[in-house]
Image (cartoon, coloured by chain):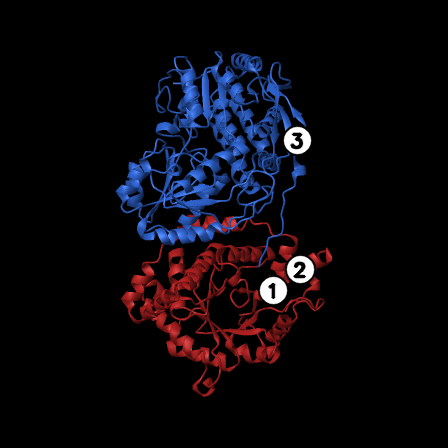
Amino acid sequence: MFEYAPAPESRSVVDIKPTYGLFIDGRFVDPSDGGSLKSINPASEEVLAEVAEGGPADVDHAVRAARTAYEQVWGPMPGRDRAKYLFRIARIIQERSRELAVLESLDNGKPIKEARDVDLPLVAAHFFYYAGWADKLAYAGFGRPPTSQHSGPDPQPLGVAAQVIPWNFPLLMLAWKIAPALAAGNTVVLKPAETTPLTALLFAEICQQADLPAGVVNIVTGAGETGRALVEHPGVDKVAFTGSTEVGRAIARAVAGTRKKLTLELGGKAANIVFDDAPVDQAVEGIVNGIFFNQGHVCCAGSRLLVQESVADQVLESLKRRMARLRVGDPLDKNTDIGAINSAAQLARIRELSDAGSAEGAQRWSPPCELPERGFWFAPTIFTGVTQAHRIAREEIFGPVLSVLTFRTPAEAVEKANNTPYGLSAGIWTDKGSRILWTADRLRAGVVWANTFNKFDPTSPFGGYKESGYGREGGRHGLEAYLNV
Amino acid sequence: MTATATSARSDLSELGRSEIALRTFLHGLPGVDQVGAEQRAAQLGTRSIKTTAKAQAIDLAIRMVDLTTLEGADTPGKVRALAAKALRPDPADPSCPHVGAVCVYPAMVPYVAEVLRGSGVHLASVATAFPSGQAPLEIKLADTRAAVEAGADEIDMVINRGAFLTGRYGEVYDEIVATKEACRGTDAGRQGRPRAHLKVILETGELATYDNVRRASWLAMLAGADFIKTSTGKVPVAATLPVTLVMLEAVRDFRAATGRQVGVKPAGGIKTTKDAIKYLVMVNETVGVDWLDPDWFRFGASSLLNDLLMQRTKLTTGVYPGPDYFTLD
C-alpha cells in the first residue's frame, strides 16, 4: 500500500482574534443593539471566534457611513483613483493568500487544496479584473455605444449597495459582490453568512491596510434578521443576494415597489449530460468535480447526472472506482479532497433528502470511507435508478450527493435537463462539436460548460434562468448590476 | 464473470487478424479530452507526500529505475561501472535497495550480464534499430535476437511510428508480434529459455495527440506487449505526466477487458525525486497498488537515481550531502 502521511497546512499562519466587532466607517466597533454569535470550525466543532450580531441600529449606522462615503469620497473620485485602491487590495490578497486560505478552510470546512488553488486565486483575479474597469466604465457598452464619438451621459453608480452572501465560498462571493460595486463607484454594506464571517472580517483588515477611505466597505456580521434589516433599509439603492431560492423570494418581495435595484443568484439543480461519445475518463473527472467540489456546496453543482443508456454501466463503474479514491477528512490536510459539511443544519438537510432518496426507491452507494467522529461529515454518495419524480432529482441538496438518471436520445436529455424550476448551469460531455452547440442552444441554463465543469473566470458572466435568479455577475455584464444605465 | 472475461479475451485476440477490425476497434476507443487529461495530471501533481510516505516512495522509485545509458560513446568499462552502481546504488548505505534493471544497447549487453548475473537486477536492451526503428524488419528482429542471446531478459523495442501515423496499424501490430517471437532468441537457444520481457516504446512525443497515445497503447497490448513505454529519450518531448496518465488508463482498461496486466514505463526527462513521486501518486490513484511494483512500473532514467539517493540520505540523516558523495557512473 502507498499511504500518504498526514500533510497538514499550518494553522499558525493566521491569527484569529477571540472576538470581532462590526466593521463600520473604517473601524471595528461593538454592536450597539445586537448580540453575538459564535463561528465554529465545522471539522471539529471548536469555537473559532465570537462575532457581533448586528442589530437594526448597527445596520443603520453602516448604511449611513456608506452613504456619506459615497457622496463625499468614493462617488466623486475619478475612476483611475478607485482603480488604484482595487489593485492594491488585489495585491494584498495575493500576498496574504495563504493566511486567507487557511482561515477559509477553518471556518468553512473546505479542503485547503481548494481554498488555496481555487478560491484565493479567483478572489484576487476578480479584484484585478474589476480594477481594470474602474476608469473605463464609459466604454463598457452601457449608456452610449463603445464606438460613439459623441460624449453622451456616462453610466453612473447607484449609490449604496446592500450585499448578502452565502457560506459556501465566503471570500469568493465577497469578491464577486464588492469588486464590481466599488469599481463602478458604489459603496457597500456587506453581510457575510452567519457560519462563515471570518474571512470577511480579515478582508476588512485588508481594506484598512490598503488605506481604503472609511465607509466605502462596511461589514456587518449577523444572521437572517441582520440581513433582513439590511435589505429592507430605506437608505439602500441596490440589493445583491446570493443564497437560497426561498430567501431570494422573500427579498424580492421586500424590495418590490421600492427604487432598489435587485440581483439574485439562487439555487440550482444542474444537469451534467454525458453522451455516448464522451471522453469517458475526463467525463468522470468532470462528474466528480461537478458534484464533490466544495462538498457539493455549490449552487451550480452538477447534481443530476444524465448519462446516455448505452454507456451508463461503463460510466458508473468508472465513477465508482474514482469515488473510492476520494480522500475525506481533515480540511487542513493538503491531500484532502472532501472536507466537512459547513453546519449541523446543512448536514441534517443532506441526511433528510438522502433518506428520502432511499425511501422513494433509488439505490444509494458510497465508497467505503471512515468519517471523523467530531464535526459534520457526509460521505460522497450517488443514487442510481433515480427518476424525475424523486425528490432527490428535483430539490437542491447542496451536499456531496449525486442523482443519476439515464436517457436514450439527445432530445430526451434536453427535456429532462430543462425539467426543473432551476436554471443556473449545465454540463455537456461529447466529442462532437456540433452536438455541444445543438444541446447548449436548447438548455435553459445561465452557464453551460462543455467537456468541463465548475470553471470560473472573472471575465465570464455568471447567473441563472428561472428560479435560479436574475442578473449577471462577472465580466462586463457584471457591471450593469451596479450602474444606472 | 469468468465466462465474460474469457470470451472478451478471445474476441480481442481476433482483432489483429484484420486491418479493418483493428482500425475499427482502435478508432472506437473513447476519445481523450486534452484539457481534461492535462488538468487531472496537474491535480495529481499537487499531492503532498511527506515523511514516512516520502521514504516509502523513494525506496520504491529506486527499485523501479531502469538505469540507462544509450550513448554512442558507451564502452564496456562504462557500462560495467553502471551495472555495479545498479547493484549497490549507495555504497555508504547497505539498506538502500538495488534498481530494477540496467538498460543498454545490444552491443553492451554481454559486459553488463557478467556483472548482474544472479543479482535479481534485470538486464534490458533496446533493440529494433533503436531509436528510429527505420530499418528493415529482418534487421530489427536480428537485433532483438542478438540482444536476447547476449543475456538481455528485457527488450525495449520501438514501434514503427511512420506506419502508425499513416494508419497502417496492421503493420505495426505484426512487427510487435514478430519482435515478441524474437524475444525467445535464436532457434538454437530457444529450448527451455524463458522469453525475454517485451517493452514497447510508443515514442509519444512523435504521436502528438492523446488519442494516438491511447490507440498505440492498445495496439501494443493487443500485439502482446508486456510493458508499454513512453519514449526513447532521443526526441525533444519525452515522458510527461498526462501521457503517462493516458497509458495507465489504457493498461487499467485492458486488464478489465482481457484479464492480462501490462506494465508502464515513462522514460526520459524524469530527473528529480519530486517528479518521480508525482508519477507514483498517479499510479496509485489511477491503477492502484497492483502496479506499484517494479514488475509493473519502471522509470527509464539516469540522473534521477542520484537525486533519489540524495533525498533518501536527507531523510535518514537529516542533512543534504554534497553531490560528490554520490557516484557519477
Q: CA distance from mark 3 to mark 2?
A: 38 Å
Type of amino acid at the residue the image marks with label 3: Ile
- The subunit letter for the residue under badge 2 reads B
Q: Can residue A5 be seen at all in this image of the molecule?
A: yes
Q: Quadrant of the C terminus of chain A?
A: top left
Q: Which chain is blue in the picture?
A: A
Q: Quadrant of the N terminus of chain A?
A: bottom right
Type of amino acid at the residue the image marks with label 2: Arg
Q: Are marks 2 and 1 in contact (CB under 8 Å)?
A: yes
Task: Respond whether the residues carrying marks 2 and 1 are from the same subunit.
Answer: yes
A276 above or below B22? above
Total marks shown come to: 3
Residue at 38% x, 59% y: name it.
Answer: B212
Q: Which of the labelled discs sits on residue A16, or is there none?
A: 3
Residue B167's image quarter?
A: bottom left
Q: Percent x, y for residue B186?
A: 44, 84
Q: Residues within 10 Å of mark 1 (few under 14, many from 20)?
A: many
Task: Quickly name the residue at label 2.
Answer: B312
Q: Is residue A138 left or right of residue B299?
A: left
From the image, state the color of chain B. Answer: red
Type of amino acid at the residue the image marks with label 1: Ile
